[in-house]
Every structure is written in structure tokens, then in C-alpha cells.
Amino acid sequence: QKGFTPAAPVHTNREDAATQTNLGFIHAFVAAISVIIVSELGDKTFFIAAIMAMRYNRLTVLAGAMLALALMTCLSVLFGYATTVIPRVYTYYVSTALFAIFGIRMLREGLKMSPDEGQEELEEVQAELKKKDEEVSCHRSPCGQPSQRLGAPLSAAFKQENEL
């Protein structure tokens, strides 16, 4: 029996494999949520959604923002999956080319932009929002008149105040 070593017992525990699978899923899920929250928190889409929620129905803005994020996430996942199917060398060159193209395009737009262009666009958007707010408020109640939802006591108070 010289040189004989008994083999270590092999334990095949299905719970360990299931636990490792669950931990892998949880790790990927937490990593994805963390990266997206950190990268999207100060993004312009964050501020656009916040401003729109101040102006429009919050549930409508939430639904639109969630739908847009879901669509962009599906596209990202599809592109990520494509990188596993296409050979790595091609994805490397394609991603490098796309990054360079979009970067150069943004630089050109930035260099062509006049110093007042951003201010002009901001004022234009603010004027449009103000116009829409006035249209919405006029639509809810006759322009210049108190809303019918205020009730008779408040309408009478407005009437008295205008007569003085």
C-alpha cells in the first residue's frame, strides 16, 4: 500500500452552485445599479426630467423617462451582446472609431458655437415653456377670471377685491 493515497471525497452540493449563481446575479445587479446611479445623477437627462416634472404631470414624465431608459438599456445590452459574438479585434476598432467620430463631432460643434448661442437657446426654451404654461392656465379657467374650482366664497372675495 505504499504510495496509495485515498482520494478526497467529492461533494457535489447543488445548494453551493445555486448560491454562487445567486451571488453572481446579485453582484452584477448591484454593480449595474451603482454604476448607472453614479453616472446618471448629474447627467443632463437627470436635470431635463427634473425640470419637466416641475412643469408637467409627474407620472407622465416618470413613465416617459422610464421608457426611454428601458429602450436605451435594451440597446446597450444588445450592443454588449454583439461584442461577444463579433471577434474582439473588430469590436475594438469599431468602438475606437465610433468614439473618435462622436468626439470629433462634439468638438467641432463646440468650436462653431457662438458664446451667446447657449443663452439664446435657453431664452427660447423659457419663452416656449411660459407660453405653454399660460395656455394651460387659460385652458383650465377663463383667462383673467378665477377658476371655478375655487368655489363661490373665493370668487366673491376676488370680485370684491377687484371692485375696490
Image (spheres, rainbow, N blue to C red):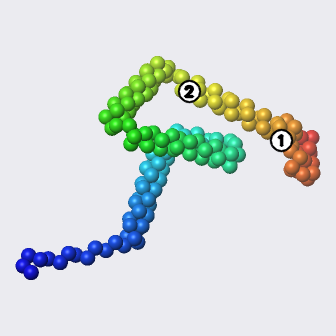
Give residue 11's mark: none
Residue at the far bottom: name it: 1
Against 27, residue 15 (above or below) is below
Q: Seen from this angle, which residue lies furthest left?
A: 2
Residue under numbered circle 1: 140
Residue found at x 51% / y 44%: 73
Q: Does residue 14 appear left or right of residue 42 in this picture?
A: left
**Residue 146 placed where, x, y %?**
86, 43
Instruction: Verify CB contact (< 8 Å) between mark 1 and mark 2.
Output: no
| Quarter in which the N terminus is drawn | bottom left
Q: Quadrant of residue 159?
A: top right
Going by the image, does 28 lie left or right of 69?
left
Q: Nearer the viewer, mark 1 or mark 2?
A: 1
The quadrant holding residue 26 is: bottom left
Q: Residues within 10 Å of mark 1 (few under 14, many from 20)?
A: few
Provide residue 99's location: percent of width, then percent of height: 39, 31
Looking at the rendered structure, the secondary structure element under dot 1 is: helix
Tell which of 78 and 97 is nearer to you.
78
Which residue is at 38% across, 42% downward? 84
Residue at 92%, 48% in the rendered image: 156
Q: Position of residue 68 (x, y in %)?
A: 58, 41
Give the labeled residue for mark 2: 119
Q: Above or below — where is 93 with respect to 48?
A: above
Visible residue check, residue 128 = yes
In this image, 117 relative to 136: left or right? left
Q: Amino acid at mark 2?
A: Gln
Residue 42 visible in the picture: no
Image location (x, y in percent) of residue 105: 44, 24
Q: How many marks?
A: 2
- Amino acid type at image mark 1: Arg
The residue under the point 86% across, 49% down is 149
